[in-house]
Image: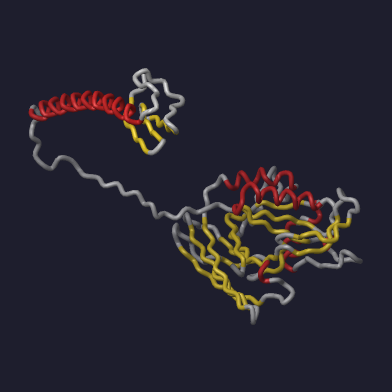
Amino acid sequence: MKYLEHLYSSKNKIVLYFNSSVYFCNNLKISNLNCHELQVVDSINIYKFRALALLKKRLMKKYTELLYLTITFLFILSSCDVIEEPYMNKQTIVNDTNQTVYTKKVLVEDYTGQKCGNCPRAHEKMTELIGIYQNKIIPLAVHVGFFAIPSSSPYTTDYRSAVGNDLNNYFKNSNAGMPNGMVNRTELSGDVILQFANWEQVVQSQLALEPEINIGIENTYNSTSKSLQSIITLTSLKDFNQTLKLCVYLKEDSLVSAQMDYEKTPSDILNYTHRNVLRDAINSTWGEIVSDQNIINKQVITKTFNYTLNSQYKPENCYVLAYVYYDDTKQIIQADERKIIY
C-alpha cells in the first residue's frame, strides 16, 4: 500500500508524494499509481479531501510514537548518575578544505623525423594518449638522426635542434630504429628507449605514483622585443637527499610542412601538422641543480629565466616546458608546460 504524504495542486496539475516517491498528475490523470484509497475523479476538491484525511491519520500515528519516545527518554535520564566535570578529553577535528591537490604528470618524448615513413604511427599514439590522459601527458617531439636531415623538396625544413642532438647523442634513440621514445626516461624491461606500442604501459605505471614535486610556470612575453621571462616555482612534496636538476625547454606546436607516411598514397604528405616540436633549451640541455642542499618537504624554490625568442617562431604556438629529474639516473619525476602567451 502506498501512503499519501503530501499533495500539492494548482491549475490542471496535481503533485502527489507517496512513500517519498513523487507523482505528477497533469489534467487530473494519475499514472503509475497503485493506491486503493484514492479514486481518480475529475475534481481537485475530492483529491484534497482524501489526501488530507490520509495525512491526518498518518500524522496522529507519528505524534503518538514521538510522545512515547519522549516519556521513555525522560525516565532513563532521571535514573542516570550525575558526573562531575571534566567529562573527558575534548578533541576537535578540522577538515582542511583548502589543501592543494597536486597532479602527477608524465613527459613523453617522441624521437622522430620528417622523412621517417613509420613515424606518423607514433604521432597518432601520442594523440591517443593525450586524448585519454589529457593534461597529465606532456608531449615533446624530438627530431633527430638521418630522417630529420633536410634534403630536396619537399623535405627542406629543419626541425633539428642543438638540445635534441645532445639528447640523441646520450640516449642513442636514432640508433635504435625510429620511431621510438621515452616516458619519463623510465626503463621497461631494462631499456629506457621504448617502441610507441609500449608507451602507455609506462604512462600508466608512472601516473599511478604520487607526485613528488610540483612545477608552476608563469610566463611574461614582450612581443616588441620578443623577450620572454619565465618564473618556475618548484614545491617539494617529500624530502630529497639526491641531486635534482631542472630543465627548461622551448617547444613550438602546429608547424606545417612535409612528412613521409608509408601508409599513404602518395607517401609524401605536403601539409602535415608537426606537433610539439622541441626548439631550444632555455637553461641548457641538462639544466641546472635545483638546490645544493638537501630539499625538505613543502620547500618552495623559485627560479627566473630570461630568453629571447627566435624571430622565426610563432609565439602564440610556443610553450615553456619544464621538468625535474634525478641527476644520477636521468629519470624524470615531474614535468609541466605552459604557453608563453595565455
Q: Residue at x 78, y 66 (%)?
A: 160
The number of numbered discs placed on residues in the rendered structure image is 0
- Left or right? Give the position of 110 relative to 220: right
- Residue sitting nearer the eye, 46 or 194: 46
Q: Position of residue 275 (x, y in %)?
A: 73, 59
The quadrant where residue 230 appears: bottom right
The quadrant where residue 258 appears: bottom right
The quadrant where residue 268 appears: bottom right
Above-or-below relation of 33 to 329: above
Above-or-below relation of 99 to 204: below
Which of the image's four quarters has the N terminus?
top left
Q: Position of residue 317 (x, y in %)?
A: 68, 66
Q: Position of residue 45 (x, y in %)?
A: 32, 30
Q: Position of residue 248 (x, y in %)?
A: 62, 66
Rendered image coloring scheme: secondary structure
Above-or-below relation of 247 to 58: below
- Left or right? Give the position of 289 relative to 112: left
Which of the image's four quarters has the C terminus?
bottom right
- Residue sitting nearer the eye, 70 or 61: 61
Q: Residue at x 70, y 52 (%)?
A: 182
